[in-house]
Image: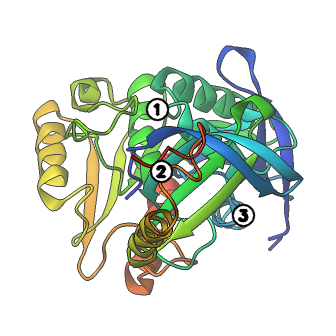
């Protein structure tokens, strides 16, 4: 077995031709493989997201995480980019879709790409993963505890974020949703409403809510980490992509 | 959760960042996952000058208790000084 990977920073073209910094990891073997676009959370492009990208490569996928805040300037540290992007109201939905489309095209242009694309996002990226799968032709989408997919954000939140439930009919891919039963954003009721809506629309989906886990249970560098939920969650993600991203 | 609420304010002062002192013109206050502090959520404050680019930033990530203690300390310090001593328009005349 050849489990060696290559990982490092690359440049790719995002929404409206913008050059984005991105972190790529891919197997060194010549086995045909699917691609995975990893959407980082709102605090930005960080070490934990890069580790997630490498994990996909170790498991046989080419994976890339675009720095959604690249437009805040080259050579600026990712935490400063995140703060600047937040002060401007965050990433507009249209721009996110364009950046994911560019990331998917980049993956499909790599040697040994089989043409299948998965998306995955955590926290705000969970909502954006759903958005991407409702806006682009995707083969498998994973939403890890994304809030505001169903519910509108509270009125005092001034960001450009709206419910996506009206787009559910356009969902182009099977959806795996992984949630913490103790989370409030999204709470179990919001998860239930989304599941019921997808049932009604006949959209393939598979949701799991873990007991004794709240928000961000995959985050190994944060107190919210819940090993049992995270270990099982990774197993479910790899099983899901194994079924939907093989040629 | 990633909270999307960002309270932005205009500020007038200076701060010392990674590349030295700069004039602070803006601030942002929000509760979200910290970048560095070992807590799930913190009260984050950015002291910035957007005119000098994203790197003109001093960031702090505080627990709720620390943030409230900071507010109290600021109010105590201002109350202990003559009115207007640190005002942009100078000390107010005693009435």
Cβ atoms at labels 2 and 3 below 8 Å apart? no
* Residue A180: percent from left, percent from top: 29, 69
Q: Position of residue A17 (x, y in %)?
A: 74, 16
Task: Tell me the distance, in whole angstroms, between the alpha carbons under discs 2 and 3.
Answer: 33 Å
| Residue A9: % across, % down | 85, 49
Q: Relative to the observer, which residue lies in front, A80 or A128?
A: A80
The label shown at residue A239 is: none
Q: Is residue A103 above or below residue A63?
A: above
- State whether residue A108 appears in this view: no
**Residue where numbered disc 2 is placed:** B29
Judge the density around disc 3: few (<14), some (14-19), many (≥20) Cα neighbours within 10 Å.
many
Between marks 1 and 2, how big is the CA–CA gap?
Answer: 29 Å
Query: Height in image: A170 above or below A90?
Result: above
Secondary structure beneath disc 3?
helix
Q: Which residue: 44% across, 44% down? A: A141
- Which residue is the site of mark 3? A54
Marks 1/3 in contact by CB < 8 Å: the verdict is: no
Q: Which mark is residue A132?
A: 1
Instruction: Give the secondary structure at mark 1.
Output: helix
A163 left or right of A189 in image: right
Q: Going by the picture, which residue comes out furthest to the front?
A: B95
Q: On the picture, is A177 further left or further right than B94?
A: left
Q: Nearer the viewer, mark 1 or mark 2?
A: 2
Question: Residue at image x 53%, y 32%?
Answer: A91
Mark 2 chain: B
Nearer to me, B86 or A86: B86
Q: In the picture, residue B63 is in which quadrant?
A: bottom left
Do callouts 1 and 3 point to residues on the same chain? Answer: yes
What is the distance, in whole Å, between disc 1 and disc 3 at their CAs? 22 Å
SS category of the residue bearing label 2: strand
Quarter in which the N terminus of chain A is drawn = bottom right
């Amino acid at each position: 077995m050849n489990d060696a990977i290559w990982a490092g920073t690359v440049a790719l073209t995002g929404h409206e031709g913008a050059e984005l910094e991105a972190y790529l990891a891919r197997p060194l073997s010549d086995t045909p493989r699917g691609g995975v676009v990893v959407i980082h959370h709102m605090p930005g492009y960080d070490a934990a997201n890069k580790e997630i990208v490498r994990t996909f490569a170790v498991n046989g996928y080419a994976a890339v995480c675009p720095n959604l805040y690249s437009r805040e300037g080259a050579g600026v540290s990712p935490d400063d980019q995140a703060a600047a992007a937040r002060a401007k109201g965050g990433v507009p939905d249209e721009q996110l879709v364009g950046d994911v489309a560019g990331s998917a095209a980049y993956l499909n242009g790599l040697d040994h790409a089989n043409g299948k694309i998965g998306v995955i996002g955590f926290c705000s990226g969970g909502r954006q993963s759903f958005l991407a799968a409702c806006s682009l032709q995707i083969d498998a989408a994973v939403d890890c505890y994304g809030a505001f997919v169903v519910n509108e954000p509270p009125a005092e939140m001034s960001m450009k974020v709206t419910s996506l439930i009206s787009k559910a009919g356009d969902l182009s891919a099977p959806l795996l949703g992984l949630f913490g039963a103790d989370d409030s954003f999204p709470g179990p009721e919001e998860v239930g409403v989304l599941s019921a809506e997808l049932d009604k629309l006949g959209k393939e989906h598979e949701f799991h809510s873990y007991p004794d886990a709240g928000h961000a249970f995959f985050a190994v560098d944060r107190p919210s980490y819940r090993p049992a939920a995270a270990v099982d969650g990774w197993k479910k993600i790899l099983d899901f992509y194994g079924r939907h991203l093989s040629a | 959760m990633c909270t999307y609420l960002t309270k932005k304010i205009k500020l007038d002062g200076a701060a010392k960042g990674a590349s030295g002192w700069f004039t602070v013109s803006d601030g942002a206050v929000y509760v979200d996952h910290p970048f560095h502090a070992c807590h799930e959520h913190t009260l984050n404050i950015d002291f910035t000058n957007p005119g000098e680019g994203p790197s003109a930033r001093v960031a702090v990530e505080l627990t709720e208790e620390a943030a409230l203690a900071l507010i109290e300390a600021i109010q105590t310090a201002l109350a202990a000084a003559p009115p207007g001593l640190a005002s942009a328009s100078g000390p107010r005349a005693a009435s």
